Amino acid sequence: MKNNKSVPCSVAVSLFRGLYARVGHKLGVDVSYISRVARGERHSEIAEKAIKREYHKVLALIRNTRPLPDMKPNRRKIRKKQ
């Protein structure tokens, strides 16, 4: 039998509660704008993708799984000076 570790409900709620704030901060826009995009009052492909990405990250944390590969942050390779 698998050892199923679940996230307490309060932690899950906290993760979702801060979702719009995290997305707004990352994009440099107001949280209310992200909320409006999520409700469909405004349209922004960039904001929509960021909301979906953050949503899937939260789900992965709740399920104790790894996020999907396309959700990894873009990291530039740093070249060492020789």
Image (cartoon, helix red, strand yellow):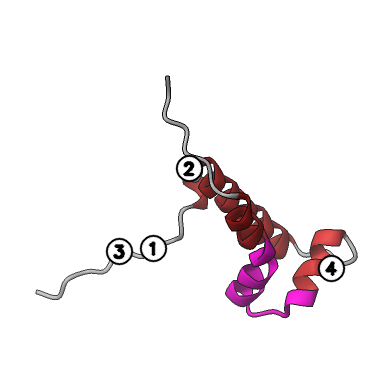
Name the residue type under label 2.
Asn
Q: Earlier in the sequence, mark 1 or mark 4?
A: 4
Q: Position of residue 16 (x, y in %)?
A: 66, 59
Tell me the mark number nearer the camera, choosing from 3 and 2: 2
Report helix, strand or loop for mark 3. loop
Q: Residue at x 64, y 68 (%)?
A: 23
Q: Nearer the viewer, residue 62 or 74?
A: 62
Q: Which residue is mark 2?
A: 64
The amino acid type, in three-letter code, at marker 3 is Lys
In the displayed structure image, the side of residue 33 where residue 40 appears, left or right:
right
In this figure, which residue is indicated by the disc labeled 3? 77
Using the image, determine if residue 74 lies above or below residue 64: below
Q: What separation in Å lies between label 1 and label 4 (alpha carbons)?
A: 29 Å
Mark with earlier residue (2, 1): 2
Label 3 near label 1: C-beta < 8 Å? Answer: yes
Mark 3, other Cα within 10 Å: few <14 / some 14–19 / many ≥20: few
Q: Are marks 2 and 1 in contact (CB under 8 Å)?
A: no
User: Depth-wise, is mark 1 or mark 4 nearer the camera?
Assistant: 4
User: In the rendered structure, which amino acid carries the disc numbered 1?
Assistant: Arg
Instruction: Provide the residue span drawn in magenta.
Output: 17-32
**At 69% across and 79% down in the image, what residue appears?**
29
Q: Which residue is pictured at 58% across the width and 73% down the height?
A: 26
Q: Is residue 4 left or right of residue 15?
A: left
- Toward the left, the furthest residue is 82
Q: In this rendering, which labeled residue sits more in front, label 2 or label 4? A: 2
Residue tagged 4: 36
| Label 2, label 1: how far apart the Cα atoms are | 23 Å
